[in-house]
Image: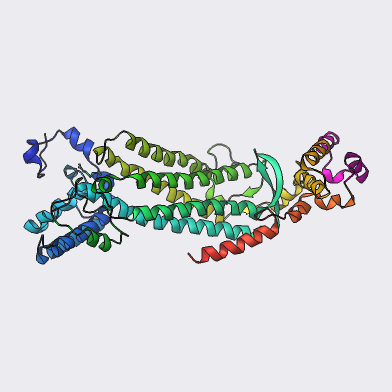
Amino acid sequence: MVTNGKSWEKRLGGGVDKLAVDFVESLSYDVRLYKYDIMGSVAHSRMLAECGLITEDESGQIEKGLREIEAEIARGEFEFNKLHEDIHMAIEAALIERIGEAGKKLHTGRSRNDQVATDMRLWMRDEIDTLRGKITDLQKAFVTLAQKYTADMMPAYTHLQRAQPIVIGAYLLSFVEMLERDFCRLGDLRARVNVSPLGCGAVAGSTLGLDREMTAKELGFDGVMANSMDGMSDRDFCAEFTFVCSMVSIHLSRLAEDMIIYSTTEFDFVHIDDAYCTSSSMMPQKRNPDMLELMRGKTGSVAGSLMAMVVMLKGQPSTYNRDMQEDKLHIFNAADVVSACVDMSRAIVSNMEFKVKGIAKRLEGGFLDATCLAEYLVKKGVPFREAHGVVGGLVAECEESGRSLGEVTLEEFTIACEAIGADVYENLGAGNVVRQYASAGAGGTEQVVEQIGDWKGRLSKR
Ligand code: ARG
């Protein structure tokens, strides 16, 4: 049995099993909340003084003591003791040891429950801002790369089968769009995160007249959570955060998968810089895209955090249960993994090249112009379903004779469909197709140049 000097030892009759000490602690990971814990405690003590629950002098001593502890932790000199369970107890115990009587008053009208909820919200607010900045940097890297490729083409794929030709910039900008939704999701979440649970107490608030608006304002929250039972135990924001992180991670994983495929000898579309490849310990010729594979692999861990979060919440009775202590493991993991993956993606995208010559050489394979030909027939008055059938027949014939659609003679075309005229050839071949794109957001130069202009304007304002 170990005794820990906690105030509740009077209630619990002595020490706890050593196994329990190790099992219950969160200090090993919630230590990273220390800055936020001190921020919350300073605001709380100022409010206690303002409300006449402690004196100005006591509040001054508390603040001074907390600042000293903060500096000590930052310098790595603070002595942590896991008997204190978590960062909240560790800091409070150190404060009492340092300043005595006044320190014992800090926890007035407060519970660790609202403390941990407050700390996590403050941490997440900063994390969201950092992550949004990193996402913006990655978007900018994509736009810069897209600017290089507004004319060079590549095939667009569906089902990983050649579909229609696009300019490479169109492909790159598709990721800017995905990341923009992630950026906005984080912004939406920030508004829900930025409300104060402080003052909700253990569950039902306090009989002391606490000024919750004051602490909320002091901590930069937009308002206070209206219901104490909900306020101290809401973890929706943790589930949402792990979901948004999963979404970012999934987007990057799909990018990684594309790049892995595109960098094979079979595709040979992109060159990933040597700085982001490794070799084989046995096969001397190898350039393996390990960073990309790890990005794809790490997505499992982020999605795992989301799963852990929602399953952890689902069976709990109302308000706080110790199950919730584990929430931090999941939000920290999701944040750390995603932040590293966004940085890595930015580095890779900023240093990659498309092998445009090789792509162009093989661009006429796979009938990328078939849809454009069908739409040409529509412009000549042929109903689309009929046009689809005509082109399907022509493609089958070409496949037999080993030709592209551009190699079909006008005579053969008119036999297949009399609506076809000599102008058909302006619709065949990847270059012609890309020039024909006319709908907003299509994969042509015109649309891509417009999107690049739009993105540059939007991203420069961030
Ligand atoms: N370390 C705990 C956590 O992270 C703090 C809250 C403990 N509250 C309690 N009622 N035991 O959730």
> Residue 376: percent from the left, percent from the top?
80, 49
Quadrant for ligand 1 reads: top left
Front-most of residues 90 and 264: 90
Taking the spot 60% from the left edge, 58% from the top edge, the residue there is 145
Q: Is residue 199 magenta?
A: no
Residue 323 seen from this side: yes
Residue 212 falls left or right of residue 350: left
Count how many numbered circles sit on residues in the image: 0
Residue 75 seen from this side: no
**Magenta stretch prevailing secondary structure:** helix
User: Which quadrant of the structure image shows residue 396?
Assistant: top right
Q: Which stretch appears magenta?
A: 395-419
Taking the spot 30% from the left edge, 45% from the top edge, the residue there is 234
The relative height of residue 416 versus residue 58 in the rendered view (above or below) is above
User: Which quadrant of the structure image shows residue 438?
Assistant: bottom right
> Residue 294: percent from the left, percent from the top?
49, 42
Taking the spot 63% from the left edge, 51% from the top edge, the residue there is 171
> Residue 326: percent from the left, percent from the top?
30, 40
Q: Is residue 402 magenta?
A: yes
The relative height of residue 16 versus residue 35 in the rendered view (above or below) is above
